[in-house]
């Protein structure tokens, strides 16, 4: 580790309060004129990398805040009456910042004492008291230079080379080692560990009921790493050759999607804030579009990041969630030289979402607004806004049929132990559409919720609860009653958590992940397989590196939620 940086004087403080919002306000501390601390170059670069890996997703590369509060050294705001308020990290001082990073807050920020060393925490606390460096831009020409082709398209096989049931493969994110595992869902064998971008956030494939229904939906998968690297995976290849091409479209990124005709892939950048359209066959970048702009409050936002991208099943468009603007951009890809973009105002800060069972309505979380936003992809307009508990986070989401409300959707929350369920069938159940049907109180806040059309149950994790036993447990909700019927602790090993679910092709199994928050770069993760009917454990798949998101080929390419 590098030599510790010079520190600011410690600021007297209080016991950790209700969250970072309070701790960054003038109510916590009087105004102090303080100099920014200094760090030696090695410590600064190491802390900058730690910030990118652990903090930028919530607080922004420029540290102006989004789901998390701003982390600027000093920020002055003026109220309508002329009163000036000064907030910032310099007010908190080194000691308090270290404690916030170490132990988290009640407002939903994770604790990092089990993930980072004390020296990393100290350097990070110093780093966020210094003005943030501005990263460089990335041009289309720079993207093109990063393209690598490992297997030429003309050499792709015309049938699977391995003779396996590839539609029941699971493509699994191995987060911090920058890999994706491919697992045979029939035999539970780990077939490959494919090198991809760092901390892949999501994978997407072509879909069966997309606008032109491309041939063999689910064969090609496209990943997006947090380092902006997009990779193309061919599940028909032998395992050692499944990575066929890659290209870098940003320095920090989150999502990717395939056009309904299978011709293009779109990747969304956190930095630079833009999206890039890439030829799906050759992986050659074709167009880049900036997402900087004016938000729903009428303010210009430089760091307006692409949080999520989804292919509309029945329209030749993508839905691009521009996080800080509070806008969904519906991008028509029929003529990429003359893009039609409909900008749909809604709420900040947009994160992730899912379609209703018809594929018409898109339901997306606006985390910091405590809302679910509904967009009608047919009319290209805002359909509804649903107020929820603190910081909804549906992940891939869940749709099912409730005996009272009819078709419904559901979400977990980052800020509270609840599952919120709302009606999402305006055609046949208009009285319940976009209204909360019921809420389920769980043991703690979580990241993911999942079900399957053939299942009686909905599964929810509780990964963000501070107590280890709850972090390690998942809860199963009965669709018929809305009650929790079982709590299952997946592990008792210190430092491990349970996260994310996916069903197999026929819906008879549920796969849940277990991984070590502190040391996710060794093969100490596993997937626990449950019988979807009896809820009993069937198997454990080992030899994995922090397995997080799991994507079953058939379910994801056929929208089985």
Image (cartoon, grey):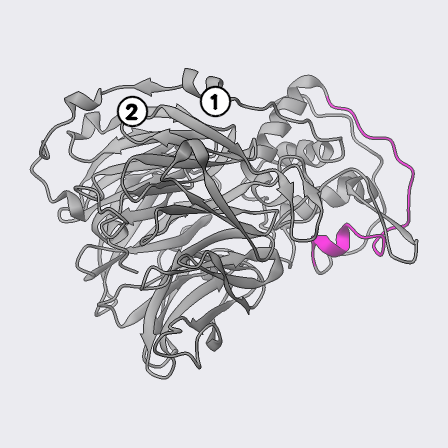
Q: Tell me the residue that label 1 is attached to.
A: 140
Q: Nearer the viewer, residue 434 or 197?
A: 434
As drawn, 235 above or below 532: above
Q: Position of residue 266 (x, y in %)?
A: 40, 36
Q: Nearer the viewer, residue 399 or 530?
A: 399
Is residue 104 covered in magenta? no
As drawn, 127 above or below 68: above
Residue at figure coordinates x 85%, y 35% from the top left: 9
Instruction: Identify the disc placed on residue 282.
Output: 2
- Position of 224 compared to 274: left or right? left
Whether residue 234 is visible to the viewer of this picture, yes or no, is: yes
Question: Looking at the image, how many numbered discs can be counted on the residues?
Answer: 2
User: In the picture, which quadrant includes the C terminus?
Assistant: bottom left
As drawn, 114 above or below 313: above
Residue at figure coordinates x 65%, y 53% from the top left: 296
Q: Position of residue 3 (x, y in %)?
A: 68, 21
Q: Main secondary structure of the magenta part?
A: loop
Residue at figure coordinates x 32%, y 70% from the top left: 400
Q: Earlier along the polypeptide chain: callout 1 or callout 2?
A: 1
Furthest residue toward left: 163
Q: Which residues are magenta?
A: 19-39
Cα distance, mark 1 to mark 2? Answer: 15 Å
Q: Position of residue 503 (x, y in %)?
A: 25, 57
Q: Looking at the image, do the residues carrying marks 1 and 2 touch, with CB atoms under 8 Å apart?
A: no
- Position of 152 compared to 450: left or right? left
């Amino acid at each position: 580790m590098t030599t510790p940086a010079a520190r600011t004087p410690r600021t007297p403080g209080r016991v950790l309060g209700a969250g970072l919002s309070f701790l960054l306000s003038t109510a916590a501390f009087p105004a102090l004129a303080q100099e920014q601390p200094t760090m030696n170059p090695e410590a600064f670069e190491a802390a900058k990398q730690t910030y990118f890996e652990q903090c930028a997703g919530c607080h922004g590369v420029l540290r102006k805040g989004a789901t998390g509060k701003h982390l600027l050294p000093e920020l002055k705001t003026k109220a309508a009456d002329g009163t000036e308020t000064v907030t910032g990290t310099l007010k908190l001082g080194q000691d308090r910042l270290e404690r916030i990073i170490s132990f988290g807050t009640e407002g939903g920020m994770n604790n990092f004492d089990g993930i980072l060393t004390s020296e990393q925490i100290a350097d990070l606390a110093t780093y966020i008291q210094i003005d943030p460096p501005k990263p460089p831009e990335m041009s289309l020409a720079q993207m093109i230079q990063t393209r690598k082709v490992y297997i030429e398209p003309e050499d792709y096989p015309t049938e699977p080379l391995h003779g396996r049931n590839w539609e029941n493969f699971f493509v699994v994110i191995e987060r911090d080692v920058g890999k994706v595992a491919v697992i045979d869902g029939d035999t539970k064998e780990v077939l490959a560990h494919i090198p991809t971008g760092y901390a892949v956030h999501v994978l997407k494939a072509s879909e069966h009921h997309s606008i032109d229904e491309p041939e063999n939906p689910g064969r090609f998968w496209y990943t997006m790493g947090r380092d902006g690297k997009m990779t193309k995976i061919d599940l028909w290849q032998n395992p050692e050759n499944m990575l066929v091409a890659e290209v870098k479209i940003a320095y920090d990124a989150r999502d990717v999607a395939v056009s309904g005709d299978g011709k293009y892939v779109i990747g969304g950048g956190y930095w630079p804030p833009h999206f890039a359209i890439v030829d799906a066959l050759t992986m050659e970048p074709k167009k880049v579009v900036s997402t900087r702009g004016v938000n729903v409050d009428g303010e210009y936002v430089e760091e307006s990041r692409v949080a999520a991208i989804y292919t509309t099943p029945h329209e030749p468009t993508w839905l691009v969630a521009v996080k800080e603007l509070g806008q969904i951009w519906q991008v028509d890809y029929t003529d990429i030289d003359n893009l039609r973009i409909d900008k749909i105002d809604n709420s900040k800060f947009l994160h992730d979402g899912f379609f209703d069972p018809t594929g018409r309505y898109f339901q997306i979380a606006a985390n910091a607004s405590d809302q679910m936003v509904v967009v009608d992809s047919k009319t290209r307009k805002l359909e509804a806004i649903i107020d929820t508990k603190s910081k909804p986070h549906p992940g891939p989401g869940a749709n099912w049929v409730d005996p009272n409300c009819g078709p419904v959707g559901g979400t977990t929350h980052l800020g509270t132990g609840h599952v919120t369920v709302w009606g999402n069938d305006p055609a046949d159940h208009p009285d319940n559409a976009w209204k909360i049907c019921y809420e389920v109180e769980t043991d703690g806040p979580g990241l993911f919720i999942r079900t399957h059309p053939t299942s009686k149950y909905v599964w929810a994790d509780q990964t963000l609860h501070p107590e280890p036993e709850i972090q390690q447990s998942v809860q199963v909700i009965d669709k018929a009653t809305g009650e929790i019927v079982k709590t299952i602790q997946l592990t008792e090993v210190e430092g491990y958590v349970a996260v994310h679910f996916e069903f197999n092709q026929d819906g008879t199994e549920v796969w849940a992940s277990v991984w070590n928050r502190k040391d996710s770069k060794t093969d100490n993760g596993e997937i626990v397989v449950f019988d979807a009917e009896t809820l009993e454990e069937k198997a454990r798949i080992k030899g994995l590196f922090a397995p997080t998101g799991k994507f079953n080929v058939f379910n994801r390419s056929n929208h089985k939620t």
